[in-house]
């Protein structure tokens, strides 16, 4: 049985003061959640978020991690730095990183390794662009992203690795994949895991949907068999909306 997971991705939003306020507003509303609750925040907000989430069921994550231990990588962050902040999750390979900051399957692979070495749970994002979808390339793209991005990882690593299927055309656009479409595509990712890794990995890996998931569509998406949770952007910035999604089964 895979435990559902609802994760917020705050992207480049919220100051420290706003972080304290938002986490404190979310906490009482999600305290009876049946799923894992994660909030991934900007680096500068991590310490504040950890403090505000202390004693609650909210886990805090970062939005990226570099593969090197230290060195001349201006603007990057190392696993050791995040470890001191005691983050539990880290988003890797988000499409915004791939699109605007040159992230590739190879760098994704290295970042996932660094995250696992630090005992973080990586949330690895995959997904096709609108052009790729329209030219019938969705499965080819996902096959490449999953096999290359997760190359070399073993069964025990998949106790920690979470995959997020985020079709790029659905992110921040208000366009969501239909629940059936999202379910089928996530089913395809599971099929890739079974073929390229092992059937037991396909069965245990948690795969989330992300892309304009909100209070209106969360119940329908979460009712699908293959969908183990959500990675929520815009709606995770509002306490009521995020809590509603976390409590999708109530
Ligand atoms: P939206 O929920 O704003 O579409 O963002 C999804 C996302 O990119 C989460 O990582």
Image (cartoon, helix red, strand yellow):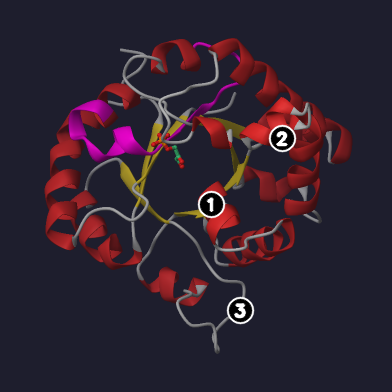
The single residue placed furthest to the right in the displayed view is: 195
| Position of residue 103 in the picture relative to residue 194 (left or right) | left
Residue 90 x %, y %: 48, 55
Residue 83 x %, y %: 43, 70
Would you say the residues marked 2 and 3 are in contact, meaning their CB atoms lie under 8 Å apart?
Answer: no
Q: Is residue 144 above or below residue 1?
A: below
Q: Which quarter of the picture shows residue 109? A: bottom right
Mark 3 CB lies closer than 8 A to ligand 1? no
| Position of residue 199 in the picture relative to residue 111 (left or right) | right
The first of marks 2 and 3 along the sequence is 3
Question: Which residue is at the front of the view, 53 or 12?
Answer: 12
Q: Quadrant of the C terminus?
A: top left
Mark 3: give few (<14), some (14-19) or many (20+) Cα within 10 Å: some
Residue named by callout 3 = 68
The first of marks 1 and 3 along the sequence is 3
| Numbered range of the magenta stretch | 223-241
Give SS at disc 1.
Answer: strand
| Position of residue 153 in the picture relative to residue 215 (left or right) | right
Label number found at residue 132: 2
Q: Is residue 38 visible?
A: yes
The residue under the point 69% across, 29% down is 133
Residue named by callout 1 = 121
């Amino acid at each position: 049985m895979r435990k559902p997971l609802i994760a917020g991705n705050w992207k480049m939003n919220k100051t420290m003061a706003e972080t304290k306020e938002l986490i404190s507003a979310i906490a009482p509303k999600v305290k009876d959640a049946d799923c894992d609750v994660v909030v991934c925040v900007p680096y500068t907000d991590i310490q504040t978020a950890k403090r505000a989430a202390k004693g609650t069921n909210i886990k805090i994550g970062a939005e990226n991690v570099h593969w090197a231990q230290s060195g001349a990588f201006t603007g990057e962050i190392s696993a050791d730095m995040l470890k001191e902040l005691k983050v539990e999750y880290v988003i890797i390979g988000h499409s915004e990183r791939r699109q605007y900051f040159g992230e590739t399957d190879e760098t994704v692979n290295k970042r996932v390794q660094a995250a696992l070495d630090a005992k973080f749970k990586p949330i690895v994002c995959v997904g096709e662009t609108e052009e790729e979808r329209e030219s019938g390339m969705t499965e080819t793209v996902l096959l490449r992203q999953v096999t290359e991005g997760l190359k070399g990882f073993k069964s025990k690593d998949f106790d920690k690795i979470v995959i997020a299927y985020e079709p790029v055309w659905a992110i921040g656009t208000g366009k969501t994949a239909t629940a059936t479409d999202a379910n089928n595509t996530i089913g395809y990712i599971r099929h890739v895991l079974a073929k390229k890794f092992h059937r037991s990995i396909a069965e245990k890996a948690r795969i989330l949907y992300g892309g304009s998931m909100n209070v209106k569509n969360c119940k329908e998406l979460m009712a699908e068999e293959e969908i183990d949770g959500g990675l929520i952007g815009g709606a995770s910035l509002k306490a009521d909306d995020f809590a509603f999604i976390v409590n999708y089964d109530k």
